[in-house]
Every structure is written in structure tokens, then in C-alpha cells.
Image (spheres, rainbow, N blue to C red):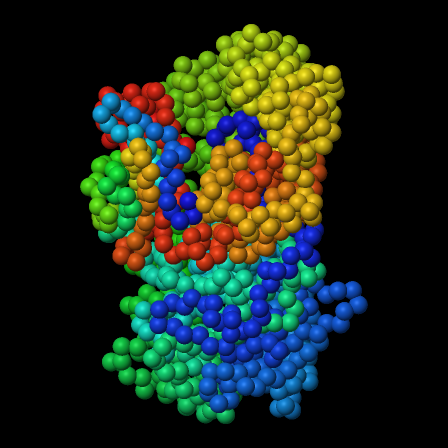
């Protein structure tokens, strides 16, 4: 069974979880009010508000009424800009006709402004992506990828083909989006967290649940998932060497490095996820790797993305760092502004070398947490801005239509990415054989002394890949390159061609590359090896472990070993395969799979004399995670064997058994005398671990000793008695709740009594509330009652006609509000018992109006920040700013720039009105009648993992789940009830400034914001008095940090 | 604070001798991806003492540290007997790849 008392990480009682989380979300109750914040829609006023990076200037390329609500854009081979726009977003009204459009914008005279707008297609429903292709375009149109074709050359779509269908439609801002042609001739497409897609292709049904990146080859209809995860990834682009990067419009880690098989947060059924390159970032939309001759050297290869919430166009410098991945640092924004309707959401390099920004133009954005019909939503405006570098002329660009093969090949040497990309794409319009002949000659004629020759060859290789023709000699050359970027790209092509190669043995290429001197080559190789369904591939992949490892590389090996599990595991268990006796490789492989089949092999390893204690502990831990109850019994025996000689190691084993017994709901039969001996150990960690597991495993024979220990104030023994239950345990717990006991024991016994007798627990809890000191927090005594079905009712009965101290009542109310399903009758009962006339903010239109006026007139954001940071208010506990703070609720970096003041006020007062995506809580009821609530961070067939309001991670075994339901925001109501009006006004003022240009925006400066403070204790002060300040930095236990 | 200023006045203070000023201690972590020079800029450097991985370091407004790859513990002691606007910034553009943890 699941045990509610301990979390998975440190065995700390979960009494402490269930507190507060602030999910600051907007609601729309009275959104009609106060439309004064809507800025003048004149584009020139908006343009003048822009603060630009040094050297840049900006002009309006296109604006309403020519365009409205641009969502996504891409340039075509003629240099025209295609726009997918939607006035219908976020949701079509009943009876409304879908009227969204695909537009083509053209600058016919080269003055940097669009002077021709063509409606290519009309009547679409929220098109979220457009990728022009000769004679038409591909469009992400809700559940379908459609190909719109102009058959008569009038720039109007007259033929519509559904190319793929079955994309999920659960949420309009998560639909299929971010269409992008790759260097390899494939169309890349993204989808987001709530989308479940099941796409029928000639090669079978392809599935992607939640976020990820698709790779699609239109000529063959081959469709695959390249990467999984990210919350709402509206940005994806390739660098010059074909490596992928993505941004996340609802994530917080900046630039993310994507490679085949990479898995990020929110991926369905994931056991492990990667981290982005800029943790603590705001949400970003769109991504373009910039470069080319119009821009100065320092901008080459920079990545541009949009902080749409805070009205900024941001710049990142991503660089090699000697690992398989990259380092990324933020530089000065290209654009920032106080204009609240500037909403940059897409960015592309134009054929003229300028940077184009799609401006959704809206004071209200998104829709998950903002009313669909808020009248401040703008449905008609939209802008495309064009950023150029002063003193550098725009580039003259060729029209790539009606261009000969030879000319197109010449363009592969161009320094402009638009030219190279579209030249490759236009080669696809010719008969492949013709292209091959000329391409072969072009490659032969390349100047080997040219410093760019290998990049030119790589462009040629991608051209072959685009037209689906193999060139083995060129591939071989690039596989032999000394440049790791070239080699890594060549390996990716070799994977595509692996079944068509005749002179190259791709397996041996990948195997050798897995030992390459550069980690990125090793990463590509190890992912390539996942395509081979044989045990040799695993052996080759594991060779990567023999060199320096980094998190991305480690993940890649782990993923490959897991992908090939069904191949090597049967061979291993049958004794036909043993990883060449390499213990490191074997241990890694076994830890990468989740299968009871590995256990016998693992036991064999423990018996091996060469296995040292550290490895032995590691192996026992893996067995505990994967083995049967009988296996767990053997692991316990291993702990018993160690207990007299190495008690610390034995304690670690027992602690791990405790964790997995709860997670997996397994309980072995163990020899109780040995366990009882262990409980008596003089080694504190071992005895504590044994006491804990006696409760988890419900060892009745341990009760007498547990009673003794509980009477000696062992809190662990108190817990275990409650878990085992029975009359003797109950009697002991009752005696432990008497007033002559210490407060710690008394409250613990009271709380865990809930597991045995709710009514009795409630009676004892109220007794404790009555005679407790006012600074004592009652949550520790009533936590289980609040989480247990029938618990609040029992408390209400027990409170009948009882009076409790007002301060204790306030704290009890706060605990009740933080519980998974707050009981209003219980809160009323506490209020009555405490005789509380508690100041309570009650949301109303009048209050919101009044507060808004005061925010505008006298709100002080500096004072507001101090209020925000008050420990009692607990904002920081759940929300981070600039990476400092909790992760239970959304980051607050730019909340002020994305939400109007009335939304902020109403969200503070009524936090569950609207909830930000990915922050809806889940309430899980276990078969024991206990409730847990938290944000689901991982769910798979074995378990549900929640992050609780306290930021703790709790795993609940699927077998223990009785029912689940969607919960509210984890942010409890009433958090700001203790604030005076001036304080509330200042707090709202601070929140409203967050992210706006000024002192409250997280900029490019990397300040240290995540500090721990040394807590004053007499002991710590004395220690420094006797030594020096240096001792505070020594890490000694006497110093406690918070 | 959002602007990186440490709210020194709200911190617990230590006064270990009659003649030493009231002092507050803070710690954080810095992850260095590639070994090399890391530059930290201190506001109110004259009121701050610095330890890196337990060892005291001489502090200047811009302090250059030679750090190995890995996670390093940064401890500062801030004199807390009058208003102090202390702040620590990683000068990313002048440092090897590093970030606050």
C-alpha cells in the first residue's frame, strides 16, 4: 500500500506537505472594466516605443488592415513572406464562420516595405503554421496538415489536399504548429502538451502524445517523431551544421538542444528528461538562428526568440563548450518596449538579410487563463517589423524560381541561409537523375583549399538527401572529417541512408564514432546505434561510458540502451551475452531498463568478488527498484549481512527498500528477528531505517519494541505504530497524546492516529488546539485529517462548542485551505471556534475597481517586492523570479507584462478561477482513503508522480490509486487575507511591473538571486567566536542554512 | 530582489566579538561548464567578504576566479550595520561558460 507518511526522497514525514502554492493566474470576471490600458493602435506610436539594440533600426514591413493576427510566417523561394493569421483565435464562436487566411506579402520595389498583399487561401479555422512550397503551401489547419495548391498560377489556392490527419485538437494554442523546412528536405512540425496525435501513414500509425517535434518527408509520407516533450514549443530552427534547437512558450529553460530521441519535460510516459540550456528563463516563442552578410560578425549564429509576455525580442549567444551540448547566454535584447500590445511571436531571417518579427499585437494574450471573450482581445491588428543593421545595405537576393540546376548549385556556397535552404528545396523540383549528374560534377569541382569546402560538401550531402539519392563517396569523406560538426551531421545522414549503403558499413561507422574524440560525434553515433536491433549495438553504445560523460551524452546512451532492451535483455538472461564482462557497462545497462528480468543477473554481480561495496549498493538499489517481493527479501538479507560490519551501508539499503516499497507497493516476507535486531542497532541511521520499514512492511512482531521506542520519544516509532495499526498501537498512541508528553510527540501521535481512528484523532487534535501555544502551527496535528475522506467532518464534530485561540484558528484555517479539497464547513467551524472576525478580502467588481485605481495612483512596487518576499506570505515558496524561488507554480518573470491589473487582483483573491496550462493540480485518492494533490510531473503505467504544494515529489503506485480527478490551482484562497489594503495595493503594483521595461524585468545580467541565508543560532555564533568567519564557509554541521 | 540587490536588512545577523560589525552570511552555487576564468562583479565590494569552495578570496569590484569545471560553492559575508546595496553579478561575456545554480 502507499504510505502517506514519507516522501520518496528523504523519508521526511509528509506532514509538512500540503501547504501553499501560488499559481498566479488571471481570471476574467470583470474584464469589461477599465479599458483605459488599451494603447493607441497607430503603428508609428508602437515603433517609437521600441528600445533597440545598438546598431539596429526598425521599420514597419506590413500592418493592419493588410494583415491581422499573424501567428506564423515563412519566406518562399521568391522572397515573399507567407503569413498564417487567425482572427478566430482563441476559439470560434457558435455560429461564426471560420474566416482565417493565408496571406502572401511582397516587397516588389525593394524598399523594405510590403506593397502587395495576396489572399492565398481563406475560410480556414485557426491555421497555426504555414510552409510555402513551389506552387502552394503546407498549412497546419487544426487536426490536419493540408497542402494548398495553386494550379493556374494566380496565387490563389484552388486545390486542397489533406496530407496527414489525426493531429489532436484539445487546445488551440497547442495544435500542430511551427512548420519549418529542414536542410534535409523534410518538413519539421511541432505540437504541444495537451495534443494527442495518431496519424495513419503508409508505414503504420505514428503516435505522439503531448509535446514534441515531427519530421515529415512529403514525397514519401514518411513521418517520425524526432524529439519528445516541452510544454508549448513554438520555436524550432537548425544551426549551420544541422543541429536543432527549440524554445518553449510555456517552459522556463530558454534554448533547448534537440537531437533524435531527446526527451524533455511533459513527454508522455517519460522516465527521464533533459534540461534546457538557460534554466530560470521566461517563456519564449519562435526561434531563428541568424547570420549572413547583412549582420556584423558578433551576430553570426546568434539565436533570436521572443519573450512575448514581456514585450521583448531576445538574443542568445549559443556556443560550443567541449561537451556534447552547448552553453547559452543571453545578450542585450534586440527590441524591448513598454508598449503592452507588442507581442512578438515569430521571427525569421528575410532574403534581404533583415530580421522579421511577427507581432501578434494584443494587450491580451494566450487563452488558457484569460477569457476567450475578453473584449480587450484584439482581433484585427497585427504587424510585421523589419530589423536592419545601420550602415549595412540590405542584401540583393535572387529569385530562385526558373533557375537552372547549375545556378541553384552555385547558391549552395552562399553565406545566406535563405539562399542555401531554398536552393536545396528547388533542386527537388527537377528530375533527380539530372540533379545527380550536375551535383556530382559540382562536388568534384569544389576547391579543396577553400576554408569552407567541408560546409559546401555538407550542403551537397543534404542536397542528395533532399532528392533521396545516395552518394557514398561524399558521405565517406564527411564521415572522415576532422571537424566534429561535419562528422556529426554526416552521421545523421548515414542513419537515413543506412539500408541503401553498399560500400560503407554503417554499423561499423557508428561503432567507431561512438569512441570518437568529440562528445557530440559520440552522441550522434550512440543514437544512430539505436536503429540496430542487435546486442552488438548496445555493446558499441556503451563504449561511450569509457570516456568523459556529460548529461546529454549520458541520456543518449541511456535512451539507446532502453530502446534496445527487447534485443539484449533476453540474450543476457539466457546467458548468451554479457557486455564483455564489463561491470560498468552491465550496471549502466541494467539501470536503464525497468524490468524484473534483470534481477538474476544483478544478483550474480553481487556475488562476484570483484564487485566493490559502492557498486554493490548501486546494484542492490536497482534490484529493489525492479525486483519481485522475493527479490526485495534477498536485498534485505544483504543489509542484514552488512549490519554488523558496515552499518552505514546497511542503512542505505534499508532506506532504499523503504522508498521502493512505498513507490511500488511491494512487501517482502522477511525474518522478523533480524529486523528487530536491526531496530536496536546503535547506528542511528540503521535503527531509524529499520524502525521506519517495520511500519511500512506492517511487521506485527515489531509492535512491542516500537511501543518502547515511542515511549522514549522516537517519532519514527510513532509513525510505524500507526502504520501497523491494531489495538495495542492505538492505546499507545492515545497515551502519547496526553498533555504531559512533548509537543512534538503529541502532535505526531495525534496526526497519525488518523490512520487508525479518525474520530479519535479529531478529538485529540481539538484538545491539542485548545491548549497549544499560540506560535505553534496546528497543521502538523491535523494534516492527515484534512487529507482523509471523512477527516474534515470528524474535526467539525470535535470542534462543536469548543473554543480555540484566534491565532491558532487562523493557522488552522490556512492549513485547511491548503488541503487537496478544502472544506468550507470546516473553515467556518474553525472561524467560529476561534471567534474570528478575520479580515477577509472578498472579490467583487467594486473592490477590483477600487484597488486598480489605487495601484495606478499610489502603488509602490519597491514596497510590494518586500511584501512579496515575506516568508509568511509564501509567494517565493512556489514561484520563482529569475530562477530564484519555488517551482510549484509558474515563473513570475513577466507576469506583469502579460496580465492586466484586474486579472492580477482577481487571481490573488480567487486563484482557481483560471489555471495556467501545466499547473492544473491532480487529486489522487488511494485505496486507503487518503488524498494527495499536486501538479502531475510524470505519469506512466507504473506510477503517478506529483509535485506537492510544498515542492516535494511524491510517487504513488498505480496499484494504490482508487480514483483521480482534476483539481484546482494549488494556490490556496485567502493567502492575502492578512494584508492591509496598502500592502495589497503595493503587492499588486509589484506584480504588475514584473517583466515590464524597468527595474522589475529580469534582463541579461546574470545576478545571483538564489541565496541561502545562514540562520542565527547561539551555537553557530559561538563557533565563529572561537574560530573565525571562515568557519561559516566550511560546511560544518553546526551552521544551518535556509 | 528582481534587480539582484540583496535585501540585507532582513537577514539574520551575527556579532561574534564586541568589536566586529554585525554581519550576515549568504551562500549560492555557481556551475562552471568549462574550466577557466570567471569574473564576478560585486556591488558594495568593500562591505563583502568572499569564500569559494570554503577558501577565502580577495575581493575587488570585479573579482576574477580561476575555476575548475563543476559546481562551486560561493559564500559571502555582508557587513550589516547600515544600509548596504549588495549584489553579485556573473559577467557572462567576460567569463568561461558558467551559470548560477
Q: Residue at x 69, y 70 (%)?
A: A125
Residue A384 vertical position relative to residue A953 in the rendered view, above or below? below
Which quadrant is home to the N terminus of chain A?
top right
Residue at position x 46%, y 40% from top?
Answer: A866
- Give percent across and percent down for residue A626: 53, 37
The residue nearer to you, when weighing A235 against B21, is B21
On the image, which quarter does residue A764 sit in? top right
* Residue shown at the point (66%, 83%) measured from the top left: A157
Judge from the rendering whether residue A837 lies leftward or rightward of residue A865; answer left or right: right
Residue A368, compared with residue A116, is above or below; it is above
Residue A945 at what x, y percent from top left?
57, 40
| Count of numbered labels shown in the rendering | 0
Between A455 and A349, the residue placed more toward the observer is A349
Compare residues A941 and B59 and report the one nearer the observer.
B59
Estimate the x, y position of residue B56 in percent, counting from the top left.
22, 37
In the visual, does A685 lie left or right of B40? right
- Residue at the right extreme, as displayed: A95
Q: Quadrant of the C terminus of chain A?
A: top left
Q: Nearer the viewer, residue A66 or A684?
A: A66
**Does the image show residue A933?**
no
Residue at the far top: name it: A740
Which residue lies at the image location 65% right of the left edge and 63% below the top edge?
Answer: A377
Place of residue A107 in the rendered image (x, y in percent of width and height, measured from the top left): 51, 85
- Quadrant in the picture for residue A58: bottom left
Does residue A739 appear anywhere in the picture?
yes
Which quadrant of the figure has residue A985? top right
Check the image and name the residue furthest to the front.
Answer: A857
Position of A25 relative to A817 (above/below) = below
Q: Is residue A961 left or right of residue A51?
A: right
Amino acid at each position: 500500500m502507499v504510505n502517506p507518511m514519507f516522501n520518496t526522497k528523504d523519508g521526511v514525514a509528509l506532514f509538512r506537505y500540503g501547504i501553499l502554492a501560488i499559481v498566479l493566474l488571471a481570471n476574467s470576471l470583470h474584464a469589461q472594466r477599465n479599458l483605459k490600458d488599451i494603447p493607441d493602435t497607430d503603428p508609428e506610436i508602437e515603433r517609437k516605443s521600441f528600445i533597440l539594440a545598438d546598431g539596429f533600426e526598425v521599420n514597419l514591413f506590413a500592418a493592419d488592415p493588410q494583415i491581422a493576427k499573424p501567428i506564423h510566417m515563412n519566406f518562399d523561394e521568391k522572397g515573399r513572406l507567407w503569413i498564417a493569421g487567425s482572427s478566430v483565435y482563441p476559439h470560434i464562436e457558435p455560429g461564426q464562420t471560420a474566416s482565417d487566411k493565408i496571406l502572401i506579402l511582397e516587397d516588389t520595389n525593394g524598399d523594405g516595405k510590403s506593397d502587395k498583399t495576396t489572399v492565398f487561401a481563406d475560410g480556414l479555422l485557426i491555421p497555426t503554421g504555414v510552409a510555402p512550397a513551389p506552387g502552394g503551401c503546407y498549412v497546419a489547419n487544426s487536426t490536419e496538415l493540408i497542402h494548398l495548391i495553386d494550379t493556374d498560377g494566380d496565387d490563389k489556392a484552388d486545390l486542397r489536399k489533406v496530407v496527414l490527419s489525426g493531429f489532436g485538437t484539445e487546445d488551440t494554442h497547442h495544435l500542430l504548429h511551427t512548420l519549418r523546412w529542414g536542410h534535409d528536405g523534410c518538413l519539421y512540425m511541432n505540437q504541444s502538451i495537451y495534443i494527442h496525435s495518431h496519424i495513419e501513414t503508409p508505414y503504420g500509425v505514428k503516435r505522439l502524445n503531448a509535446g514534441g517535434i515531427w519530421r515529415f518527408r512529403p514525397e514519401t509520407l514518411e513521418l517520425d517523431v524526432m524529439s519528445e516533450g516541452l510544454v508549448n514549443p513554438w520555436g524550432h530552427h537548425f544551426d549551420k551544421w544541422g543541429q536543432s534547437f527549440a524554445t518553449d512558450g510555456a517552459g522556463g529553460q530558454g534554448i533547448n538542444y534537440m537531437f533524435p530521441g531527446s526527451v524533455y519535460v511533459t513527454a508522455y510516459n517519460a522516465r527521464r528528461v533533459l534540461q534546457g540550456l538557460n534554466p530560470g528563463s521566461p517563456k519564449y516563442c519562435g526561434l531563428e538562428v541568424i547570420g549572413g552578410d547583412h549582420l556584423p560578425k558578433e551576430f553570426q549564429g546568434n539565436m533570436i526568440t521572443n519573450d512575448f509576455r514581456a514585450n521583448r525580442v531576445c538574443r542568445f549567444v549559443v556556443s560550443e563548450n567541449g561537451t556534447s551540448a552547448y552553453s547559452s547566454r543571453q545578450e542585450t535584447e534586440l527590441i524591448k518596449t513598454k508598449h503592452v500590445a507588442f507581442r512578438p511571436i515569430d521571427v525569421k531571417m528575410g532574403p534581404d538579410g533583415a530580421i522579421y518579427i511577427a507581432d501578434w499585437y494584443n494587450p491580451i494574450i494566450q487563452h488558457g487563463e484569460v477569457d476567450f471573450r475578453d473584449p480587450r482581445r484584439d482581433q484585427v491588428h497585427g504587424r510585421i517589423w523589419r530589423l536592419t543593421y545601420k550602415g549595412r545595405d540590405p542584401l540583393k537576393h535572387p529569385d530562385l524560381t526558373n533557375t537552372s540546376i547549375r545556378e541553384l548549385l552555385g547558391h549552395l556556397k552562399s553565406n545566406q541561409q535563405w539562399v542555401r535552404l531554398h536552393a536545396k528545396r528547388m533542386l527537388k523540383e527537377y528530375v533527380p537523375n539530372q540533379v545527380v549528374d550536375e551535383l556530382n560534377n559540382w562536388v568534384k569541382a569544389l576547391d579543396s583549399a577553400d576554408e569552407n569546402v567541408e560546409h559546401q560538401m555538407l550542403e551537397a550531402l543534404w542536397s542528395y538527401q533532399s532528392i533521396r539519392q545516395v552518394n557514398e563517396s561524399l558521405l565517406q569523406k564527411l564521415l572522415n572529417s576532422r571537424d566534429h560538426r561535419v562528422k556529426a551531421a554526416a552521421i545523421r545522414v548515414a542513419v537515413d541512408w543506412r539500408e541503401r549503403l553498399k560500400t560503407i558499413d554503417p554499423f561499423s561507422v557508428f561503432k567507431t564514432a561512438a569512441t570518437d574524440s568529440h562528445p557530440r560525434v559520440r552522441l550522434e553515433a550512440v543514437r544512430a546505434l539505436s536503429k540496430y536491433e542487435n546486442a552488438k549495438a548496445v555493446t558499441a553504445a556503451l563504449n561511450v561510458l569509457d570516456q568523459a560523460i556529460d548529461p546529454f551524452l549520458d541520456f543518449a546512451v541511456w535512451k539507446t540502451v532502453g530502446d534496445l532492451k527487447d534485443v539484449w535483455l533476453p540474450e543476457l538472461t539466457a546467458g548468451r551475452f554479457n557486455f564483455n564482462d564489463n561491470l560498468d557497462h552491465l550496471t549502466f545497462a541494467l539501470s536503464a531498463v525497468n524490468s524484473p528480468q534483470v534481477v538474476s543477473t544483478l544478483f550474480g554481480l553481487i556475488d562476484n568478488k570483484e564487485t566493490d561495496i559502492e557498486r554493490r549498493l548501486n546494484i542492490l538499489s536497482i534490484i529493489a527498484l525492479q525486483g519481485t517481493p522475493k527479490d526485495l527479501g534477498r536485498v534485505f538479507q544483504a543489509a542484514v549481512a552488512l549490519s554488523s560490519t558496515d552499518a552505514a551501508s546497511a542503512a542505505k539499503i534499508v532506506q532504499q527498500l523503504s522508498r521502493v516499497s512505498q513507490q511500488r507497493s511491494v512487501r517482502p516476507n522477511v525474518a522478523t528477528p533480524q529486523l528487530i535486531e536491526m531496530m536496536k542497532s546503535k547506528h542511528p541511521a540503521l535503527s531509524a531505517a529499520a524502525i521506519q520499514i517495520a511500519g511500512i512492511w506492517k511487521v506485527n512482531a515489531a509492535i512491542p519494541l516500537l511501543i518502547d521506542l515511542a515511549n522514549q520519544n522516537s517519532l519514527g516509532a510513532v509513525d510505524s505504530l500507526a502504520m501497523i495499526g491494531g489495538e495495542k498501537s492505538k492505546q499507545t498512541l492515545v497515551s502519547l497524546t496526553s498533555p504531559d508528553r512533548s509537543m512534538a510527540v503529541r502532535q505526531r501521535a495525534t496526526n497519525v492516529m488518523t490512520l487508525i481512528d479518525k474520530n479519535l484523532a479529531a478529538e485529540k487534535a481539538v484538545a491539542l488546539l485548545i491548549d497549544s501555544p499560540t506560535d505553534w502551527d496546528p497543521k502538523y496535528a491535523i494534516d492527515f485529517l484534512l487529507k482523509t475522506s471523512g477527516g474534515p467532518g470528524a474535526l467539525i464534530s470535535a470542534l462543536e462548542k469548543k473554543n480555540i485561540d484566534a491565532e491558532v484558528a487562523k493557522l488552522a484555517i490556512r492549513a485547511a485551505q491548503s488541503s487537496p479539497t478544502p472544506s468550507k464547513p470546516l473553515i467556518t467551524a474553525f472561524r467560529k471556534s476561534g471567534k474570528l472576525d478575520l479580515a477577509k478580502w472578498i472579490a467583487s467588481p467594486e473592490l477590483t475597481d477600487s484597488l486598480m485605481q489605487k495601484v495606478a495612483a499610489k502603488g509602490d512596487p519597491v514596497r510590494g517586492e518586500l511584501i512579496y518576499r515575506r516568508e509568511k506570505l509564501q509567494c517565493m515558496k512556489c514561484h520563482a523570479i529569475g530562477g530564484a524561488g519555488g517551482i510549484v507554480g509558474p515563473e513570475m518573470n513577466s507576469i506583469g507584462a502579460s496580465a492586466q491589473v484586474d486579472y492580477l487582483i482577481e487571481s490573488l483573491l480567487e486563484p482557481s478561477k483560471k489555471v495556467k496550462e501545466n499547473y492544473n493540480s491532480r487529486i489522487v485518492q488511494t485505496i486507503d482513503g487518503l488524498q494527495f494533490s499536486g501538479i502531475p510531473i510524470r505519469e506512466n503505467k507504473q506510477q503517478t508522480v506529483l509535485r506537492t504544494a510544498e515542492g516535494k515529489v511524491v510517487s504513488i503506485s498505480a496499484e494504490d490509486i482508487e480514483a483521480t480527478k482534476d483539481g484546482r490551482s494549488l494556490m490556496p484562497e485567502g493567502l492575502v487575507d492578512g494584508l492591509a489594503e496598502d500592502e495589497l495595493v503595493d503587492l499588486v503594483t509589484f506584480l504588475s511591473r514584473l517583466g515590464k521595461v524597468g527595474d522589475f524585468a529580469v534582463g541579461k545580467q546574470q545576478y545571483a538571486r538564489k541565496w541561502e541565508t545562514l540562520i542565527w543560532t547561539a551555537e553557530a555564533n559561538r563557533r565563529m567566536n572561537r574560530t573565525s568567519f571562515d568557519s561559516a564557509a566550511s560546511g560544518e554541521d553546526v551552521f544551518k542554512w535556509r | 530582489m528582481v534587480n539582484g540587490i540583496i535585501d540585507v536588512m532582513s537577514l539574520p545577523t551575527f556579532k561574534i566579538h564586541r568589536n566586529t560589525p554585525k554581519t550576515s552570511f549568504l551562500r549560492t552555487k555557481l556551475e562552471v561548464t568549462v574550466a577557466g576564468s570567471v569574473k564576478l562583479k560585486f556591488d558594495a565590494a568593500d562591505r563583502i567578504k568572499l569564500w569559494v569552495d570554503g577558501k577565502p578570496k580577495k575581493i575587488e569590484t570585479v573579482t576574477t576566479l580561476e575555476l575548475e569545471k563543476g559546481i562551486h560553492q560561493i559564500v559571502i559575508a555582508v557587513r550589516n550595520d547600515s544600509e548596504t546595496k549588495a549584489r553579485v553579478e556573473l559577467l557572462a561575456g567576460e567569463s568561461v561558460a558558467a551559470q548560477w545554480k
